[in-house]
Amino acid sequence: MSETRVNLDAGGRLVIPAAYRKALGVRPGDSVVVALDGREVRVFSPREALRRAQAAVRRHVPRGRRLSEELIAERRREAARE
C-alpha cells in the first residue's frame, strides 16, 4: 500500500484512512498499537503485536519445546509441595 498524507487536528489526532483500517483489520473504536521507531510512528493491530511477540519468543525457544507445558508442570510440582 502506498503512502498517503493526513492532517493532525487541533487535538493532535489523525484519522487513519479507511483503506488502511481495512488492511489492518481494525474499525473505529478498536484499539491499535502505536510504536515510535526512530523518527517514525508505526501503527499496527493488536493481532500483529501478538504475532510479533510470538515470533520473537520463537527465535529463542528450540523447536518442539513447549514453554506452556513446562510452566504447568512446574506449577503442579509447586502445588504438590504445599
Image (cartoon, rainbow, N blue to C red):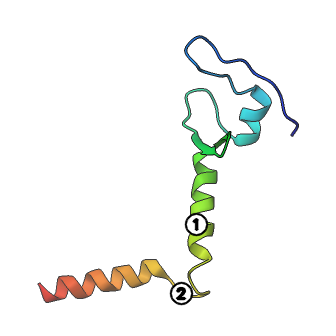
Residue 43 x %, y %: 65, 40
Label 1 amino acid?
Gln
Q: Quadrant of residue 35?
A: top right
Query: Which mark identifies residue 18?
Result: none
Give the image location of residue 55, x and y in percent.
63, 68
Q: Residue at left 86%, top 40%?
A: 1
Q: Is residue 54 above or below residue 74?
A: above
* Figure quadrant of residue 20: top right
Q: How many residues crowd around disc 2 within 10 Å: few (fewer than 14), some, or many (20 or more)?
A: few
Residue for point 67% across, 22% down: 15
Q: Position of residue 48 (x, y in %)?
A: 64, 52
Say whether residue 25 is left or right of residue 34: right
Q: For the residue labelled by badge 2, is the local secondary structure a helix, a strand or a loop? A: loop
Of callouts 2 and 1, the N-terminal one: 1
Toward the right, the furthest residue is: 2
Q: Residues within 10 Å of mark 1 (few under 14, many from 20)?
A: few
Q: Residue at x 21, y 84 (%)?
A: 78
Q: Quadrant of residue 11?
A: top right
Q: Along the horizontal axis of the image, is 10 left or right of 40?
A: left
Pointer 2: what residue? 65
Return the mark for residue 54: 1
CB under 8 Å between callouts 2 and 1?
A: no
Mark 2–mark 1 distance (CA, rounded to whole Å): 14 Å
Identify the image quadrant of the C terminus. Answer: bottom left
- Amino acid under disc 2: Arg
Relative to 72, is 44 above or below?
A: above
Return the residue found at the far left: 82
